[in-house]
């Protein structure tokens, strides 16, 4: 038998509560030519028992002898993957039946795209929210200074580029491994998004990684610092605090904050005019988007940037 066209990669750690739903959603895909690599960290629940209850030959269980964490587990899976494409999945989400078929079709029709994601709809706590990201590769690249406009468990990646660029998740960026990865490789090839809801993204209290917001922002901030350095800016502590607040649009609204943001955005624009690190005019559009959002929250009546 030849290699499967797609390798689905899913790390698991203490995921028993929602694991069967996640596995079933992959096995019930309308596209069937895939291998399903499940990398299991030693767990305190019956995750292993659930996985071993399946007899589908497409499932490949990789049992870590000690807890390695998300990044290292993903790296192990990437090394093992034999498919032309690698699709991510999380152990508490649900992939809709057409997900792999639609993403594969998109990638085949857009051979220049290296990584693509999809829209999501939340389930569990605070259900029913649809989150979509831009499909424009230049906008995705430009927004990397602030936030990754990719939802990690929805992405599909070309394995040829994984091999060519030695794709690896960096464990040092705990809780922001994906942001770090995208910030590096979006410099080398285009990213995009398919604007269809193809994954149900679960919000729940057991998922500490998704809820530990402060910890995530700490490591996301390190990625932003790296982007600012590449842009040519040696940021002050005050500027970095402003950039963090602006990136996640969480701040105490005031006219003073809006004025500081405008000054900072102007500095970013001028730095990019010199370095040409981000593509134009997409970068200016990303700045304009953030400025309009700041004006809306701060009740600034003249949002012209």
Image (cartoon, rainbow, N blue to C red):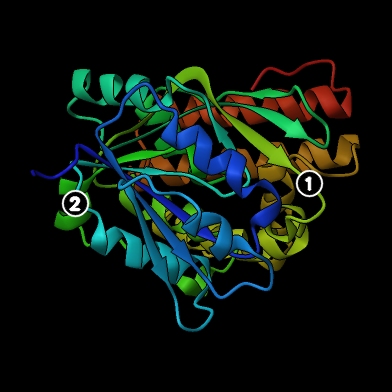
Q: Kindly identify which residue carries mark 1.
A: 204
Q: Residue at x 34, y 61 (%)?
A: 77
In this orientation, which residue lies closer to the viewer: 274 or 171? 171
Badge 1 or badge 2: first in the primary sequence: 2
Name which residue lies at 76% across and 30% down: 294
Q: Is residue 117 above or below residue 46?
A: above
Rendered view: 283 above or below 222 = above
Q: Are the two marked residues, 1 and 2, in contact with CB atoms closer than 8 angstroms?
A: no
Q: Which residue is painted at 14% across and 55% down in the image? A: 164
* Mark 2, secondary structure of its residue: loop
Residue 169 in view: no
Q: Position of residue 191 (x, y in %)?
A: 34, 34
Residue 193 falls in image quadrant: top left
Q: Percent position (x, y) of residue 211?
A: 77, 54
* Quarter of the figure that contains the C terminus: top right
Residue 245, given in percent of the width and then of the height, sits at 74, 48
Residue furthest bottom in the image:
66
Q: Nearer the viewer, residue 136 or 192?
A: 192
Q: Total label count?
A: 2
Q: Which mark is residue 125?
A: none
Drawn side of residue 167 relative to residue 164, left or right: right
Q: Which residue is mark 2?
A: 82
């Amino acid at each position: 038998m030849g290699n499967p066209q797609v390798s689905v990669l899913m790390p698991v750690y203490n995921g028993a509560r929602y694991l069967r739903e996640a596995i079933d959603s992959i096995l019930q895909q309308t596209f069937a030519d895939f291998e399903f690599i499940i990398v299991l960290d030693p767990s305190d629940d019956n995750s292993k028992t659930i996985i071993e209850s399946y007899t589908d030959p497409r499932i490949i269980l990789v049992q870590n002898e000690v807890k390695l964490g998300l990044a290292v587990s993903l790296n192990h899976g990437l090394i093992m993957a034999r498919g032309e494409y690698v699709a991510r999945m999380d152990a508490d989400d649900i992939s809709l039946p057409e997900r792999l078929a639609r993403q594969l079709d998109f990638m085949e029709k857009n051979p220049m795209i290296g990584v693509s994601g999809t829209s999501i709809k939340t389930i569990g706590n605070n259900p029913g929210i649809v989150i979509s990201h831009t499909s424009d590769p230049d906008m995705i690249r430009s927004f990397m200074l602030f936030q990754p406009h990719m939802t990690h468990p929805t992405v599909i990646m070309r394995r040829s580029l994984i091999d060519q660029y030695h794709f690896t998740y960096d464990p040092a960026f705990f809780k922001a491994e994906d942001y770090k990865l995208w910030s590096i490789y979006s410099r080398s090839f285009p990213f995009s998004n398919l604007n269809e809801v193809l994954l149900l993204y679960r919000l729940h209290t057991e998922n500490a990684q998704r809820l530990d917001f402060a910890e995530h922002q700490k490591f996301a901030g390190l990625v932003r610092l790296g982007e600012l350095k590449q842009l040519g800016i040696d940021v002050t502590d005050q500027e970095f605090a402003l950039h963090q607040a602006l990136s996640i649009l969480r701040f105490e609204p005031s006219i003073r904050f809006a004025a500081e943001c405008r000054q900072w955005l102007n500095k970013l624009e001028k730095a990019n005019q010199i370095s040409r690190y981000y593509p134009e005019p997409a970068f200016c559009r990303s700045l304009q988007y953030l400025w309009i959002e700041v004006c809306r929250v701060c009740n600034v009546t003249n949002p012209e940037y």
